Image (cartoon, rainbow, N blue to C red):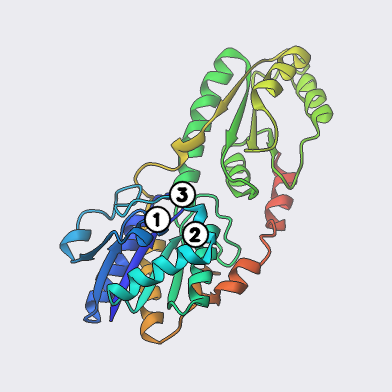
Amino acid sequence: MRIGVITSGGDAPGMNAAIRAVVRAALSYGDQVFGIFDGYKGLVEGKIQEFTRKDVSEILNRGGTILGTARLPEFAYEQVRDLAVKQLKKNDIDALICIGGDGTYTGALRLSEMGVKCVCIPGTIDNDIASTDYTIGFSTALNTACEAIDRLRDTSSSHQRCSIIEVMGRHCPDLALYSGICCGAEYIVTSQTGLDKEKLLMDLKKNRLQGRRHAIVVISENITDVYSLAKEIENYSGYECRATILGYIQRGGCPTPEDRFLASRLGVYAVDLIHQQIYGVAVGVHENCLRYLSLSDALAEPNNPDESLEALLTKIQ
């Protein structure tokens, strides 16, 4: 077969490991593999190159994606997707493996509806793909966030400060919950918990009066303006307060062993499914077992918060 592989949307550590797994697994079947550069935009423009084992050597531990990525809002239009389908036909590509988040899944679903044989692999630091327990990139982003919070805790304690750390995650609370629990944050604020500002201010003031030298608040992005919140906390609680937005630093860096292993498993599994003639699906892991769902089901599955984490949080804070 002739199999294309593409990375789309936000980059995530471990994408290169997934590309490597796809290429090597496909070659083991005797397939030809084609890397498509710069996401769906590159597909539309025909940026396609055949890959060999050499092309994916020494990328297992590299962050980012050697294929590059780009966002293409116009891909929502059928006439733009028609150009992508024509490029696939022009290069005689039989199936397409797409690595990315929900936007990538949506694009692949639309291509599937146009007859393209697609399999998706979850690659996003937010861990916001509900059809898999973990996404490629989440482990690395979590490690980056934890390291930053640990460093900020050191200086917060030295200066008797309250530190607010904003982590990524969009509407998914996982990065904030996991990093907050792992770093012993006094407060974790997500889209699920909501921000009770009055309670937060009162609790921090109480902590300060009790002589606690520092406080750590971990908050998901898009909840509030953390710089304004820091000023309010400083004015009310008696703590000197600083806000830090970790931002895109969470996207980069060498993938953790967990991300490399997950990416390798899912990359090989995607190729196996293509050879079983199973298309229009997204792969993932559930309770450490590989599984696949239809793309429509994967996108429709609700991203419910883990209730066990909420229970854990109430008992250890």
Placement of 11 over or under 146, stated as above or below: below
Kind of residue at badge 3: Gly
Judged from this view, the residue extending furthest toward the left is: 54
Could you give the CA–CA distance between mark 3 and mark 1, rounded to whole angstroms?
Answer: 13 Å
Q: Residue 95's spot in the image, x, y percent? A: 37, 76
Vertically, is 227 above or below 138?
above
Q: Residue at x 44, y 36 (%)?
A: 249
Q: Which residue is mark 2?
A: 75
- Say which label, 3 or 1, has the lower sequence index: 3
Q: Earlier in the sequence, mark 2 or mark 1?
A: 1
Point out the image quarter for the N terminus.
bottom left
- Look at the numbered discs 2 and 1 and tell me whether their residues touch, using CB distance below 8 Å: yes
Residue holding disc 3: 10
User: Which residue is painted at 65% across and 48% down in the image?
Assistant: 171
Point out residue 133 in the picture as x, y percentages from the top left corner: 56, 63
Q: Is residue 283 visible?
A: no
Image position of 53 (left or right of 72):
left
The residue tagged 1 is 41
Mark sitting on residue 312 = none
Q: Secondary structure at mark 3?
A: loop
